[in-house]
Image (cartoon, helix red, strand yellow):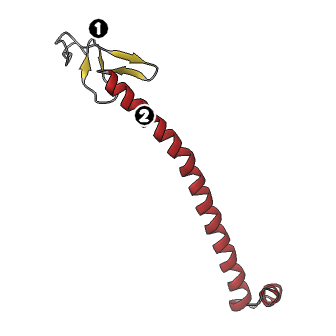
Amino acid sequence: MASSICVSCHRPAVAHCYTCHKPVCKNCAVKSGEGSFCSSACAENYAKFNARYKGEGRSSFLLKLVKLTLLLAILAGAGVFVAAKVLQIPYFVELLKKLGF
């Protein structure tokens, strides 16, 4: 990292901003629990992004779970329909009659 120069004071850089990847020296680096940043604005932007990203991860998992459940229900229904109408399996024929199909 000795060849990199700090964007703020032009001293040798010791790190790169975790958000924008600009080189920063020891004196100019804004440190946080997530890493080193070139400014407090970059640190705040990273914290906001990270909070949104973590939130989307949970809702995304729920959405995938709902989609998978719906897909399995559709496949099960199609399987029953094929078993009754195409394969003429008596149990499924009676099941469809009871359901009104």
Task: Please name the residue that numbered disc 1 is placed on.
Answer: 27
Q: Amino acid at mark 2?
A: Lys
Q: Residues within 10 Å of mark 1 (few under 14, many from 20)?
A: few
Out of 46 and 96, give the one closest to the viewer: 46
Q: Amino acid at mark 1?
A: Asn
Q: Position of residue 12 (x, y in %)?
A: 21, 10
Q: Residues within 10 Å of mark 2 (few under 14, many from 20)?
A: few
What secondary structure is marked by label 1?
loop
Out of 28 and 71, give the one closest to the viewer: 28
Residue at the image position 26 percent from the left and 17 percent from the top: 24
Quadrant location of the C terminus?
Answer: bottom right
Q: Quadrant of residue 32?
A: top left
Instruction: Give the left or right position of residue 57, taking residue 97 as reference.
Output: left
Eye-nearest disc, 1 or 2? 2
What secondary structure is marked by label 2?
helix
Q: Position of residue 61 (x, y in %)?
A: 57, 50
Quadrant location of the N terminus?
Answer: top left
Residue 14: which disc?
Answer: none
Residue 22 in the image: above or below residue 66: above
Q: Position of residue 53 (x, y in %)?
A: 47, 41
Instruction: Give the left or right position of residue 25, taking residue 83 as reference.
Output: left
Q: Position of residue 52 (x, y in %)?
A: 47, 40
Task: Please name the residue that numbered disc 2 is placed on.
Answer: 48
Instruction: Give the left or right position of residue 28, taking residue 99 as reference.
Output: left
Lower position in the chain sequence, tag 1 or tag 2? 1
Residue 87 in the image: above or below residue 11: below
Residue at the image position 57 percent from the left and 56 percent from the top: 63
Residue at the image position 50 percent from the left and 46 percent from the top: 56
